[in-house]
Amino acid sequence: MPMSSLATLCLVAHLLALANWHATAAHHALFLTETENHPHSVITTAYKASAAALENIGWTADRAFESTGFFTAEALAKYNVVVFFFTNGDSEPGILDASEKVAFQNWYRSGKGFVGVHSAVDTYATKWPWYNKLIGAGFNGHLSPRPGAVSIKDRSFEAVAHLPDYWNITDEWYNFNFAYDPPRSKLNVIATVDTRRYYEGRTTSSDHPIIWAHEYDGGRSFYTGLGHIDTLWSYPDFVKHIAEGIRWAARESLGNAGPNKNYQETIQINAPGPATNPIKLPTGLPMTTPTKATTKASTTRALDEVLVVHAINVGSEVDFVNGDGITYKGDYGYSTSGTFDVEEIIDANANEGVLYQIERHAKDGPFSYSLGVDPGKRYCITFKLAEIFWKADPDEWAERGWVYNGWKRVFDIWVEGEVAFSNVNTFEQAGALYKAHDLKYEYAATDSNLNIEFKNVIKKAKVNAILVEEIPSNTLGPTTNPTRIPSEMPTEMPTPTPTKAHIEVPTTSSPTHTPTKIPTVTPTTSPIRNPDRMSVIHAINVGS
């Protein structure tokens, strides 16, 4: 039976509506970038990238340099989502006055969305309890920018579904005072970062939330602690992470809003670093065939999926087996230098403290280690350090009966002719005398000899133990395979249905990167790698 003209017109209208749903939805986002303290230099670059991504899917974006004129009931009514974009300040009344706070709360409670980016947690961290619960946490310090591996925990979230299991980026990593104890009692923790890679972090845990979301007081809230480094905003995958978080807050994007309170990973507060308490790799990853190095004292042994090539008990003539079964061989491979040892107990993992009691130091100039490796393979070098002699603190010198002379130890570590760490001051970085402090460096071998040099800046360069691990080629992160995704996940995102937008971030801002790649991290002052993917190559009990 022929379809009536009216029915035909209705069908055509319906199909046109589906095809242009996002254009007619008139979604709008307001980016507030007001600050009380120093403004992040990345704000303008980050806003332009985010606005372009949203405009590409039919949204509009406005930037409010300050709240005046934007945080009224009339002005806010236009917006689906408000983004606190690198805002900061914890005073009263703060970046919003009393009437603006009321208008913002009423707008949000009507079912709207909130997104906080990076230093948004440094906004009203203690002065406005409602906001603290809205965003989920308050700022509690940070370290200088350094590489790290973000571990994706909830792939149902489109804000992270396109990212690899371990998302290796360089950023400024925040510590938090969470509004909920534990965080997962109220928050869906979407991704974490392992703070045991921070070395000097205030908290050390394999479970440190960095991206989360929840429904609160009638609306939706999404937070990402990422974005401090300006180069991140040139990568389409990162910008998509932000844009999808905004879409989720507007109830457009997929993602669980409920808390994941049944999460079972053990949280270790003030736990030792990864070199002394390595995390086991996920099951199912193929092992790399162990390859012996050419150095006469090399030890090669698989520990789960960790391959030890060199483990050196620096400064000692005897071997030492740590609690993880790694044998640190008596010192070898070094050039002429001096040694020094103490009987004091080192504040380190209980099964490794002895490694830090003896050091090898630059007696009359630089000293070095020459170790055998295999060309073409990648390695992670762990330098185990503890200041066991020099501390620029007259009181402690007096307590020990020493004559204070103002000395302090500062030195550089070179790997294969390149500066791996500059101006190392173990005492200041560890925070105390007799406290362990590890530095990690990732490098690709170009020949069969690994040359490590320790050079004086102020007084005698030193090292207490050296561990060299091979990084299995089949478990590398983005350096060699930026888009590694679990086998059960599709390598491409499915074609979106007409009921939700699909973000295609323009690639013109980063012409050398495809929309699915993450930047390769080049170690600078404090390189970090993901020990879940490492193989131990060298471990040296320095000075023993």
Image (tube, grey):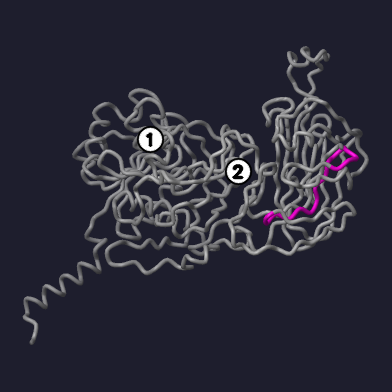
Work out whether 88 lies above or below 264.
above
Circles 1 and 2, Cβ within 8 Å, touching? The answer is no
What is the quadrant of the N terminus in the image? bottom left
Identity, as a three-letter code, of the amino acid under mark 2: Arg
* Residue 150 numbered mark, or none: none
Q: Quadrant of residue 396?
A: top right
Horizontal side of 496 relative to 273 (left or right) equals left
Asked whether 350 or 91 is in front, the reply is 350
Horizontal side of 532 relative to 389 (left or right) equals left
Residues at marks 1 and 2, CA–CA distance in whole angstroms: 26 Å
- In x, y percent, where is residue 108? 26, 40
Q: Main secondary structure of the magenta part?
A: strand
Q: Which residue is mark 1?
A: 34
Residue 426 sits inside the magenta stretch: no
For the point 81% across and 57% down, the residue is: 373
Horizontal side of 341 relative to 500 (left or right) equals right
Q: How many marks?
A: 2
Q: Which residue is mark 2?
A: 146
For the point 62% across and 51% down, the residue is: 280
- In x, y percent, where is residue 109? 23, 39
Q: Earlier in the sequence, mark 1 or mark 2?
A: 1
Identity, as a three-letter code, of the amino acid under mark 1: Glu
Residue 313 sits inside the magenta stretch: yes
Work out whether 114 lies above or below 479.
above
Q: Which residues are magenta?
A: 304-319
Horizontal side of 217 relative to 478 (left or right) equals left
